[in-house]
Image (spheres, coloured by chain):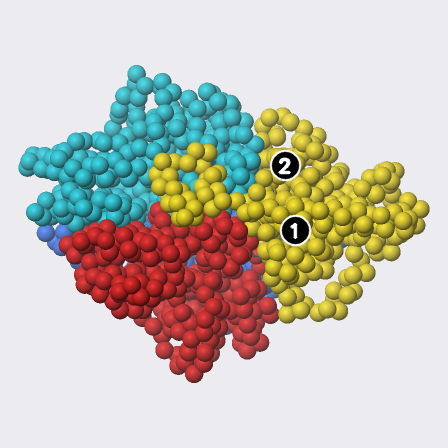
Chain colours: A cyan, B red, C yellow, D blue
Amino acid sequence: MNALTLVEAVRLALARALADDEQVLVLGEDVGLDGGVFRATEGLLERFGKDRVVDTPLSESLFVGLAVGLGAQGFRPVVEYQFMGFIYPAIDQVLNHAARLRNRTRGRLTCPIVVRAPYGAGIHAPEHHSESMEALFAAIPGIRVVIPSSPAKAYGLLLAAIRDPDPVVFLEPKRLYRVAKETVDDDGESLPLDRCFRLREGDDVTLVSWGASTKETLAAAERLAGDGIEATVIDVATLKPMDMETILASVEQTGRCVIVHEAPLSGGVGGEIAAGLADRGLVHLLAPVRRVAGYDTVVPLARLEAHYMPSEARIIEEVRKVMAYQ
Amino acid sequence: MNALTLVEAVRLALARALADDEQVLVLGEDVGLDGGVFRATEGLLERFGKDRVVDTPLSESLFVGLAVGLGAQGFRPVVEYQFMGFIYPAIDQVLNHAARLRNRTRGRLTCPIVVRAPYGAGIHAPEHHSESMEALFAAIPGIRVVIPSSPAKAYGLLLAAIRDPDPVVFLEPKRLYRVAKETVDDDGESLPLDRCFRLREGDDVTLVSWGASTKETLAAAERLAGDGIEATVIDVATLKPMDMETILASVEQTGRCVIVHEAPLSGGVGGEIAAGLADRGLVHLLAPVRRVAGYDTVVPLARLEAHYMPSEARIIEEVRKVMAYQ
Amino acid sequence: MTEVAAFRIKYYRCLDPNGALVGPLPDLLEEPAALIDLYRAMVLTRSFDAKAVALQRTGRLGTFASSLGQEAVSVAAAAALAGEDVLVPSFRDQGGQLLRGVSMEELLLYWGGDERGSDFAGPREDFPICVPVGTHAPHAAGVAFAFKLRGEARVALCLFGDGATSRGDVYEAMNFAALQQLPLVFVVNNNQWAISVPRARQTAAETLAQKAVGAGMPGCQVDGNDAIALRQVIGEAVERARSGGGPALIEALSYRLSDHTTADDARRYRDDAEVTARWKEEPIGRLRDYLVGKSQWTKEDEEKLLADCAAKVDAAVERYLAMAPMPPGAMFDHLYQDLPAALRPQRDALEGETNS
Amino acid sequence: MTEVAAFRIKYYRCLDPNGALVGPLPDLLEEPAALIDLYRAMVLTRSFDAKAVALQRTGRLGTFASSLGQEAVSVAAAAALAGEDVLVPSFRDQGGQLLRGVSMEELLLYWGGDERGSDFAGPREDFPICVPVGTHAPHAAGVAFAFKLRGEARVALCLFGDGATSRGDVYEAMNFAALQQLPLVFVVNNNQWAISVPRARQTAAETLAQKAVGAGMPGCQVDGNDAIALRQVIGEAVERARSGGGPALIEALSYRLSDHTTADDARRYRDDAEVTARWKEEPIGRLRDYLVGKSQWTKEDEEKLLADCAAKVDAAVERYLAMAPMPPGAMFDHLYQDLPAALRPQRDALEGETNS
Ligand SMILES: Cc1ncc(C[n+]2csc(CCOP(=O)(O)OP(=O)(O)O)c2C)c(N)n1
Ligand SMILES: Cc1ncc(C[n+]2csc(CCOP(=O)(O)OP(=O)(O)O)c2C)c(N)n1
Ligand SMILES: [Mg+2]
Ligand SMILES: [Mg+2]
């Protein structure tokens, strides 16, 4: 048993997967000697050698396509994109190939690959280092999109992603990389890729979030509890395919829902959740479904980024509005 | 006055824009002598010369970046991607640069560019030629996403897109390129980029769609009218930023809404609309908001594609379900 | 000022357009059977292409990309491979695919709009046809990387067109292949056109072979209408790659005698006269002239071959046309290994709808 | 087998590491004032870099990329441009940017997390700093294309690192520039490292200059620690481009004496000994040695320059630190020319929240 940060848990899962399955490879820029810019791969080169932990040239259009070839040959490559801001050249290969290879060959060739990238604002990083664009991937059929919210979830979900026989985009909330430790047992147990996590139970309102925003969401829930408003907090975790059932079940009880995500409001994954509620949850809704999200703007540079991200205060304000409906 | 097909209207708008403003350029693969694979640029090379109508090499990562440079210098490039299936390498430049240039330079450099591409299934095209991935662009802050549904709208909206001072992704429903003619007056009048179109008026239910799916949606509405169900049909047309007000106003009257789009259900733009209803329209909703959409699958090849696209029958079925609520 | 590096691009040819031998004779000539195999494969490809175009014209096939005039490139490339190697083809490589054991029926299914066409019964590890130009080059690098990591003496071969050489991902794949010294041969079928864009307006580079220089690997040109030279040069590159010598780029200078695809009308942008002139260089007549000259091929052989090809093609077409489409629900079958619970209602709805 | 093309990569140097002249003398030497300007600009850059790193270490600046040891490349490139030309810089080109008239305050604002830092009061058409590696190469092609289309005798110059040469979009931009014979000069600051990846593991190509061969344009190497050679060779390429001679790629062989950025610790992956050795080649001491040797520079000049630089940097830092952040609502100000109605409620909510 071990108290680890989220980034340490990522590293532990990678090491475990590399040790357990010799088909697993780690590829990316600076993943070798440097151990990755966030140290997620620190020590892996030394332990597993340069055939398993591969520094790549600076070629973001290449990596997923390379992984598709490796995957078709039975490897399980885990590709790191250094920041989400540099992952967009990969969308072509994710959408046109990784997501389709099994389907278009009727199962003859498969694509058991994982594409990792840190995402999100809040660490005073340079331009292009702070976006939350998970919606781009959640719109692509044929893949999974996973975002962990804690060290233990990072460990279990990343193991599951690596073992999954299909392509998984695994986005890591870098704002949480080092903020808190959690006990992570290196037991090789994976977590399910088709289920939300209930982080908190409460009968009055359902708060739905994922990744870094679970932090402010949980904090808001605690504060609201002080005022007698008890919230269920759901961590969606697997954004695609999404476990809408757990969310619906909770809203059936509470009748109220606030969705919190750091990505821009319009076109964000929150819309999909709200749409599910407008359809299958409608009869239970006692109040409008509100979304607290990043604005529909470019994420501002460091001086203003704190104003961009959904804050505890904004969440509380929306919950109060939602509670005001009878 | 002229009865034109949609693709002819696109061509007319391009010609008009090239004639009116010498800063306008047309770039893309085969846009010159060949006139584009759908003939959207036919005759433009002959009329405007090779400095205004530029055949490019096969370099999809380049075009939008090239347009960013041209745009910063005051040109208004209109870039054609031959099919939406080949546009994904452009997302990097759209998101990281085109959408941000004005903002990050505080208005010093701007990006008055248009990125055109035909999208959608239904013409028995080869693999990768049938996707509807407008959601990828609708998730990007700082751009506009426009989809016309008729020849006259194609003309007016494309002119507006070209004249707009900011980047516009203009997606053309290729299934409608030649299905019907409409009178298009080459009067140089553009259409607004921030307003839905009401294609049909009815008090019982609001049908919301855009692009190619408006065809089946309108057909369904006519059929339903035969049974006494009168639908308002809204063509969203400008998906980003979106005119939610028109949709809300209609649902306020009808209390019922079915959204129809060809893109995959999950992560599609329909989710954003339903989310708007679950929030600001909730009090008026008499029935669940249903979405009739492409499935969350890879678009099947030609033999099965008809089963993929939302059909008139599926729309009618959903409307009936929605009407059944009291 | 000093010179720090120098590069030379060479051009290879064995048969001139009249089928006469030029230059040093390749080892390959000592295997007449191999030459005849090449010849047969090219003729079969041409028969298949002609039939596929006819099927499209009569509404029984979707858009199709004929390889008319370029049969030598794809066939010679495939002939240079061992069975356990992996072919990563473009969308115009039916010649090589057929030689590798992809069936005509599969190819027709694919172009007819049926995913089962990419479930090759023969070369199970070969990649399917790639439509988004050049996007398969990274796959080939991945496959070759797999071979290298496992220490297998296998080679990947990736075919693409002149247009594809302008794609950044093709460059990235070549650069990576050279860096890792992968067992990977890139063959560019420079058929002089990318739809309406002629070779000269694709790049200012004097040759496409020199794309290899920027990537850090050897590159050369071969007469793409000369099956013997192609087979020889590609074969040498394949065996060099197999034995750890790293990747290479081979530019085959061919010509697209047909429209780009059945959806194209090349007369909009190129002169018929140019095409007519190029017919004199086409690879099948050239090799036949050589074989006939060497008395390795007779008129009877030719007639029998043509009849054989026609029979094979016709039989495949019949099987193709007889094949019922998959049920609509099949679009969910191989989306994931196991359909996630969240998607089951969609499949059920589709099946309900189409059963009713 | 015939040779169809041949390419040579040349290397240029004027000053050896001791500041002694080698090889043929460039015209530039006839303008001592120009050399002294180069020298001053490099020294200012180094002062600025040192201060910026110090600010970051004390929490008053964000992540920063020092150009320590590479001042000559960026400064010489900018010096080769006319005012109406356009610089399209990477994220390590403060040297060139300062010379072009970008203010230190603007650079500090940018790295301090304030968009106003890219609203250059000086070179209004220059592109802002580009963080996504290589993605600015297409912009440079667009700018140069604009010049060509308008028939203007202006040039765009694009700077990037060795790592960027592995990016497909950089290749695509170079290929297009050559095809269109654009007035565009690409300068690669080959500082031997892309974070932890050494030059040798970026590409198997013997030189980065030869990336030009694949793209179809001339390429050469220059000693990147030799400001004179750089200014001369880049200047020639700029003037050739200006007069319609098309683009070129110039590889400047430099060395990154600092960490990659303030967020990096280079000792994790490279030997201090390597860095120590490279200090002997750095460009500022080298040019000073030359100038002092020619009696064009004295100890007093040096002292005065250092004091001047320190004063300028300090004054800029003061202005930077005194500058209040923009109001939060500013994030909506330049999103579109006119904020669409659909977004106004969001801006109002943000402003309401932050005013309360
Ligand atoms: C990425 C991409 N862009 C555009 C297209 C449309 N398209 C199909 S083939 C083709 C030209 C390809 O030229 P080349 O690489 O020379 O191959 P060829 O068709 O001559 O065999 C184009 C532009 C495509 N399929 N993929
Ligand atoms: C597209 C992209 N990928 C990754 C990064 C992260 N990153 C920043 S600088 C850098 C290395 C760049 O190396 P090089 O091009 O040699 O420039 P240098 O830093 O040496 O000046 C990397 C990988 C980035 N900024 N952009
Ligand atoms: Mg071609
Ligand atoms: Mg470098």
Amino acid carrying label 2: it is: Ala
Q: Measure the alpha-carbon separation of dots 2 and 1.
A: 20 Å
Q: Which quadrant of the figure has residue C104?
A: top right
Q: Nearer the viewer, residue A175 or B150?
A: B150
Amino acid carrying label 1: it is: Arg
Say above or below: B313 vs C173: below
Q: Is the distance from the Cβ of mark 1 to the nearest ligand 1 atom less than 8 Å?
A: yes
Give the residue number, with chain letter if any, for mark 1: C92
Q: Residue at x 55, y 36 (%)?
A: A109
Callout 2 secondary element: loop
State left or right for residue B210 relative to residue C239.
Answer: left
Q: Nearer the viewer, residue C224 or B314?
A: B314
Give the residue number, with chain letter if any, for mark 2: C121
Q: Position of residue B115 (x, y in %)?
A: 44, 62
State left or right for residue C280 relative to residue A131.
Answer: right
Q: Position of residue A147 (x, y in %)?
A: 33, 36
Say above or below: C119 vs D130: above
Q: Residue at x 76, y 50 (%)?
A: C310
State left or right for residue A216 relative to residue D136.
Answer: left
The answer to whether marks 2 and 1 sit on the same chain is yes
Q: Nearer the viewer, residue D194 or C157?
A: C157
State left or right for residue B66 relative to residue A223.
Answer: right
Q: Residue at x 53, y 76 (%)?
A: B48
Report the number of numbered marks.
Answer: 2
Q: Nearer the viewer, mark 2 or mark 1?
A: 2
Q: Position of residue C196 (x, y in %)?
A: 62, 64
Q: Residue furthest top?
A: A1
Q: Nearer the viewer, residue D30 or D122?
A: D122
